[in-house]
């Protein structure tokens, strides 16, 4: 069968078969004249145009039917001229208003009957195809833009190991040269990147594993030799459920990881020295304790170091130098230990060392010796030479510890012992220390109970005027009536009361009771000048916010005059807090109470300070009085103190006068008031009252 021009159909049945065939085609077939009038068409054509018959089609003209009738006309003209098959696209506007895109494959044919040029055309409706092509390119451009704008490096490799896609970020992150990327060879890319990684074998293993299991997904981290860290994520690329390749995505998480690491590091290290902190040290200690429990041959030691007089460095040279010193000490301590050992800073000027796997105690004491020697060498900080030393307590694993805090506690106790024994030395923890600590704890507990049950009593030691030979007043001295231990003297509990703060309630009671006792004496046995009472104030008491109110209250409720109350404070109390102390002393003075400097000569004895504190009297410590006369020396000290007091218009009280010889020297030195066993011991209130009664008699 020939379809081109010039050949006639052989029979009617041929023509019918052809018509039937054409009628079933999905393509639109038409015959038109050069003007574009459609002479014949199959149903698919009519359906495309949107009409039901050729008859109906004749009602429409080109402008009705074509979106761009001009172009259609030009195409037809060109076709008529050169006669070749032309394929062109145009848009039809159907009567129902719908616009369709069609592809027309058209040829000009000469009709032998009429000798007229006719067009035979085949129309294909490509509206859908056009639309999906548009959508596809839109999707593609979106994907490309997304791929390029993401911060992740992305690589897609097909199942043959050919790089299918990648983004710029990927190339930058891995520094891949252009020629490798251009080769599209994944193996070359892999070979190139391996060298940058800390664990190239691990990297390769994963790659192989994933290419062997196409459906697997994976997520891991890659560490680079230059410190960078990438997260690597991979999953299969699938088309219709079948995997055709693999997508790799890489994210540079170096910053995040560094920040995380920094956080963890900060949580376990001291910010100033970068040494492990208490938390980390305890952790390591717990591990050593565990090991010691499992292995009989394993022993370790903990050294607890506290700098001696660090506060002095801080206060005199400033915190900057103080900090520098701590850093320098940290570095020196690190020099004193072996690699497996740990130096930590617990805080302040406290350091600890964990000596791992030692033979016996001598290993620990050797390190302590070395440490002390090293720390004894001068430090040069900001051009200044600074000297320091440390007291060290040592605790050994032998004692079968269960908890890190117990070991630290014992090493700390031993350190305290080293301090007490003169500093710049070490002590190894032993059971006596433990016993002492237990006793201390017991004392604390007892003291608390004593405060609740009011187990304290005051004794009163008379103060005597050498001029008149009469009792001028009493020093109130606290005693503890312990239910089991009997009478406990202040030297045995005042320091613990200070440490625990129990001195506050004790002191408040002492003050009130002393004032009431004095009021009783003054009322029943009036004297001229009136009797006084001296009350000791320790550092904690002196620093209480409500000290003034307490004193005013004790004076007020007892009804004594403020000038009858003498408060005794030691030098160290005021010198440690010089500025605030001066202000407080002024306000006390404004209340009208008298202020005496107790135990003078034992503390700093900063004579230069003395004039700044407006005090009424100096009490010469009994240690000076004790040796008066033995050698001339102490007499001279006492003489100096008396002269000094005179110049500053202060009275002098000599404490602890026990012998007649001491008394006669004091007389020659012109010391006005005395107190001591030579006259009276501290007396019970009853005995003191009896004494007052004899004194008051005219
Ligand atoms: P202090 O204030 O220096 O008190 C004088 C101490 O010397 C008293 O000891 C007293 O008994 C003792 N003493 C008096 N004359 C002689 C003597 O001739 N020879 C000797 N060897 N000692 C003598 P005490 O009562 O044991 O008090 C000791 C320290 O306890 C007091 O020293 C004082 O600092 C403190 N203290 C006593 N009572 C209190 C108080 O109520 N509050 C506070 N904060 N401290 C107190
Ligand atoms: Mg005193
Ligand atoms: Mg004293």
Image (tube, grey):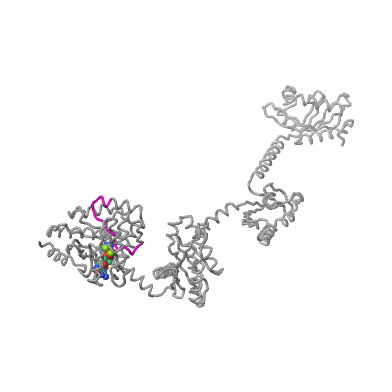
Q: Judge left or right: residue 428 versus residue 140.
A: left
Q: Nearer the viewer, residue 63 or 38?
A: 63
Image location (x, y in percent) of residue 468: 17, 62
The answer to whether residue 599 is magenta is yes
Q: Nearer the viewer, residue 656 or 205?
A: 656
Q: Nearer the viewer, residue 41 or 93?
A: 93
Q: Judge left or right: residue 92 versus residue 542.
A: right
- The image quadrant of residue 23 is top right
Image location (x, y in percent) of residue 80: 85, 26
Image location (x, y in percent) of residue 102: 74, 32
- The image quadrant of residue 194 is bottom right
The answer to whether residue 285 is magenta is no
Range of the magenta residues?
587-603
In this picture, is 538 found above or below 485?
above
> Residue 488: in sight, yes or no?
no
Image location (x, y in percent) of residue 244: 70, 52
Q: Quadrant of the N terminus?
A: top right
In this picture, is 514 found above or below 104?
below
Q: Where's ligand 3: which quadrant?
A: bottom left
In this picture, is 292 found above or below 328?
below
> Residue 297: in sight, yes or no?
yes
* Residue at 79% from the left image edge and 34% from the top image edge: 22
Q: Nearer the viewer, residue 214 or 616?
A: 616
Specify the farthest residue to the left.
698
Picture mark count: 0
* Residue at 74% from the left image edge and 56% from the top image edge: 187
Q: Quadrant of the C terminus?
A: bottom left
């Amino acid at each position: 069968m020939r379809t081109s021009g010039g050949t006639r159909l052989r029979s009617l049945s041929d023509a019918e078969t052809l018509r039937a065939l054409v009628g079933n085609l999905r393509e639109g077939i038409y015959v038109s004249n050069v003007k574009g009038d459609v002479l014949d068409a199959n149903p698919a054509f009519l359906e495309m145009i949107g009409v039901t018959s050729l008859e109906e089609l004749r009602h429409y003209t080109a402008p009705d039917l074509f979106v761009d009738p001009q172009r259609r006309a030009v195409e037809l003209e060109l076709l008529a001229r050169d006669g070749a098959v032309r394929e062109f696209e145009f848009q039809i506007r159907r009567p129902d208003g719908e616009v369709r895109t069609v592809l027309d494959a058209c040829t000009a044919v000469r009709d032998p009957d009429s000798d007229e040029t006719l067009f035979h055309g085949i129309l294909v409706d490509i509206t859908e195809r056009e639309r999906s092509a548009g959508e596809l390119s839109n999707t593609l451009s979106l994907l490309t833009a997304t791929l390029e704008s993401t911060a992740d490096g992305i690589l897609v490799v097909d199942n043959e190991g050919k790089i299918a896609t990648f983004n710029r970020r990927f190339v930058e992150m891995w520094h891949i040269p252009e020629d490798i990327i251009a080769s599209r060879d994944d193996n070359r890319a892999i070979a190139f990147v391996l060298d940058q990684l800390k664990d190239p074998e691990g990297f390769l293993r994963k790659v192989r594993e994933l290419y062997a299991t196409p459906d697997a997904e994976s997520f891991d981290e890659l560490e680079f030799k230059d410190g960078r860290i990438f997260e690597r994520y991979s999953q299969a690329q699938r088309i219709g459920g079948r995997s055709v390749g693999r997508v790799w995505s890489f994210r540079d998480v170096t910053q995040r990881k560094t920040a995380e690491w920094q956080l963890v590091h900060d949580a376990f290290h001291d910010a100033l020295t970068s040494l492990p902190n208490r938390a980390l040290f305890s952790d390591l200690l717990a591990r050593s304790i565990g090991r010691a429990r499992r292995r009989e041959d394993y022993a370790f030691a903990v050294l607890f170091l506290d700098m001696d007089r660090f506060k002095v460095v801080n206060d005199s040279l400033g915190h900057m130098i103080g900090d520098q010193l701590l850093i320098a000490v940290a570095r020196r301590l690190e020099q004193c230990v072996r690699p497996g050992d740990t130096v930590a800073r617990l805080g302040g000027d406290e350091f600890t060392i964990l000596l791992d796997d030692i033979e016996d105690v001598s290993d620990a004491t050797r390190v302590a010796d070395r440490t002390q020697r090293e720390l004894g060498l001068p430090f040069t900080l900001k051009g200044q030479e600074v000297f320091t030393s440390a007291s060290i307590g040592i605790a050994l694993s032998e004692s079968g510890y269960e908890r890190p805090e117990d070991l630290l506690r014992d090493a700390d106790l031993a350190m305290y012992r080293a301090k007490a024994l003169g500093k710049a030395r070490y002590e190894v923890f032993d059971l006596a220390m433990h016993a002492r600590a237990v006793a201390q704890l017991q004392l604390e507990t007892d003291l608390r109970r004593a405060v609740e049950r009011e187990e304290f009593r005051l004794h009163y030691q008379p103060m005597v005027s050498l001029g008149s030979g009469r009792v001028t007043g009493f020093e109130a001295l606290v005693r503890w009536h312990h239910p089991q231990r009997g009478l406990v003297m202040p030297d045995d509990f005042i320091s613990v009361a200070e440490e625990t703060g129990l001195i506050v309630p004790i002191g408040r009671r002492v003050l009130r009771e002393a004032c009431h006792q004095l009021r009783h004496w003054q009322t029943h046995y009036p004297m001229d000048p009136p009797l006084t009472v001296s009350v000791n104030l320790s550092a904690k008491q002196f620093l209480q916010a409500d000290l003034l109110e307490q004193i005013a209250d004790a004076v007020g409720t007892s009804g004594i005059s403020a000038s009858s109350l003498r408060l005794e404070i030691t030098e160290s109390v005021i010198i440690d807090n010089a500025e605030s102390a001066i202000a407080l002393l002024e306000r006390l003075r404004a209340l009208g109470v008298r202020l005496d400097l107790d135990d003078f000569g034992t503390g700093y004895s900063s004579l230069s300070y003395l004039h700044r504190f407006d005090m009424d009297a100096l009490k010469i410590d009994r240690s000076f009085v004790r040796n008066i006369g033995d050698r001339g020396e102490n007499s001279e000290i006492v003489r100096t103190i008396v002269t000094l007091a005179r110049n500053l218009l202060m009275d002098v009280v000599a404490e602890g006068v026990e012998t007649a010889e001491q008394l006669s020297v004091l007389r020659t030195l012109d010391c006005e008031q005395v107190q001591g066993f030579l006259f009276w011991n501290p007396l019970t209130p009853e005995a003191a009252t009896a004494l007052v009664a004899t004194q008051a008699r005219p």
